[in-house]
Amino acid sequence: MSTVVVDNVSKVYPGGVLAVDGMNLRANDGELLVLLGPSGCGKSTLLRMIAGLEEITSGDLWLGGQIANDLPPRDRDVAMVFQNGALYPHRTVRGNLAFPLEIAKADPGMVRDRVTELSRALHIVETLDRKPGTLSGGQRQRVAMGRAIVRQPSLFLMDEPLSNLDAGMRTELRMEISALVRALGVTTIYVTHDQVEALTLADRIAIMNRGVLQDVGTPGQIYNDPATAFVAAFLSSQQLNLVACTVRTPQNQFIMLDFGPHQLTIPWSDPRAYAISQFTGSQIIIGIRPDALSPVPESYDGPSFTGRVRTLEYHGHEWLAYLEAGLPSVAVPEPPDPHGRAAQLANGNGSQGRFKSMVRRLISGPPENDIPGHANGSSGGSGSHRRADLIVRLGARPAWRAGDTGKIAVDISRIMAFKLDGSRVDPPQR
Ligand SMILES: Nc1ncnc2c1ncn2[C@@H]1O[C@H](COP(=O)(O)OP(=O)(O)OP(=O)(O)O)[C@@H](O)[C@H]1O
Ligand SMILES: [Mg+2]
């Protein structure tokens, strides 16, 4: 029985770096939970706090129903695998795999059997008598994985174990990890910044940005029904189109999303209509994945945008078009920079009033009309893109050429509506 509960956990490193900010998370018994997020968002820090390698600044960690904040790492029954699985260079693969059992004084016959069984499962039988220095990167990671698994801990923690491998090896090993941890039924928390790895491996995904949990759910839930614009953008294989609009409800007949040069209407029968109508007169952000847009003939009279094809881009299996439609593109809204916040507090700007307003901002996002990173103006949050174009998928044979005027149909059922702070207008039910 091994559940992990992270209850309002924060981590401030010496020097005031806020790496994890009020994290709440639960990994269920036997679950493969993937922690996903961009570089520097605090994934390793959270994993290391669970392993006991890093002190928890505030909040509680529960392992198997016991509070574990001050439990020494060796008493946590946790095995961890890192990006560069360190092996004992002077021991053979067999010696490396056997070591955790030998120090636990396991019966030699049992050790032999376990090592044999595991080396078969990990496809490293032929390497058993070799030293780590003679192995390929993929084989080394398999041995590191095996060494973590061999003593059957109640919790596996894996920190980007595949990120140093080539694409083919990653796919292969990913499937093997998935099969292995599921066969063993051991609760696993797996860190990656690769969305494909997360979507293919996870029972559930927890996605972080700047130390803040953005969303948690099954791969299908967070892909199709993301809680924030950040999640939608991070999981899009092509760049997510994010466009600001004003909500209008003319004579209460329908909902109009007013983008300036273009409008889209949403009927009252749409399940999101009521939530969006609450923003009448205010601005919201609409997220449109490129695959919700399709080129249509000029005569099409459904929901659509028209624009000039600025460039076409060849992607092998398909072409992408960048369409200038005069839409007010915005950058992905981000939580406030935690380094900036920590520094602000340290510099004495954290007086009661300012602090409260900052906390309010953190919870509710920037005030109305403060559109983050407007594409034809301010630069937006760090790491965000300036995007003035709509990205449209054209398939293998493009209907357009650069300079053409093109019309694109918008699949209204697939657009996503976000508040200016990036949270959903119609929050998903989890
Ligand atoms: N020992 C430390 N002292 C001070 N700051 C640290 C320390 N370790 C990490 N940080 C900072 O904490 C933040 C989170 O780091 P962390 O390593 O947890 O990110 P990550 O999500 O694992 O990133 P990556 O995908 O690049 O591994 C970063 O800004 C990092 O610079
Ligand atoms: Mg890391």
Image: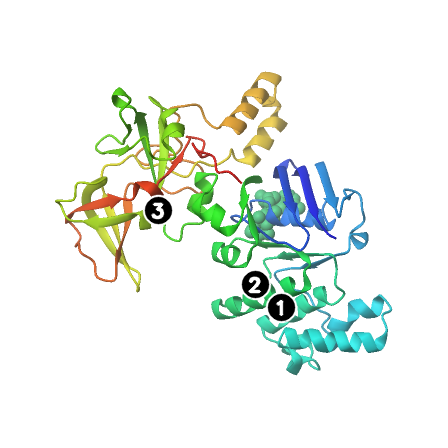
Q: Amino acid at mark 1?
A: Gln
Name the spot of residue 93 as percent of width and height, x first.
71, 76
Left or right side of 259 for 4? right
Q: Which residue is at 60% across, 61% downward?
A: 161
Who's the residue at 41% across and 41% down the image? Answer: 384
Q: Amino acid at mark 3?
A: Arg
Residue at the spot of label 3: 289
Cα separation, mark 3 vs mark 1, equals: 36 Å
Task: Classify mark 3: helix, strand or loop.
Answer: loop
x, y percent for residue 245: 31, 30
Question: Could one spot residue 95 in this view of the protein?
Answer: no
Q: Residue at x 83, y 78 (%)?
A: 109
In three-dimensional space, the C-alpha distance between marks 3 and 2, rounded to whole angstroms, equals 28 Å
Position of 196 with respect to 406 (left or right) is right
- Is residue 181 positioned above or below 295 on the image? below
Write down the residue under mark 1. Answer: 141
Q: Mark 3 touching mark 2, by CB under 8 A?
A: no
Q: Which image quadrant is residue 201 in?
A: bottom right
Image location (x, y in percent) of residue 357:
54, 21
Q: Give the SS element for disc 2.
A: loop
Residue found 31% across the figure and 27% down from its top: 246
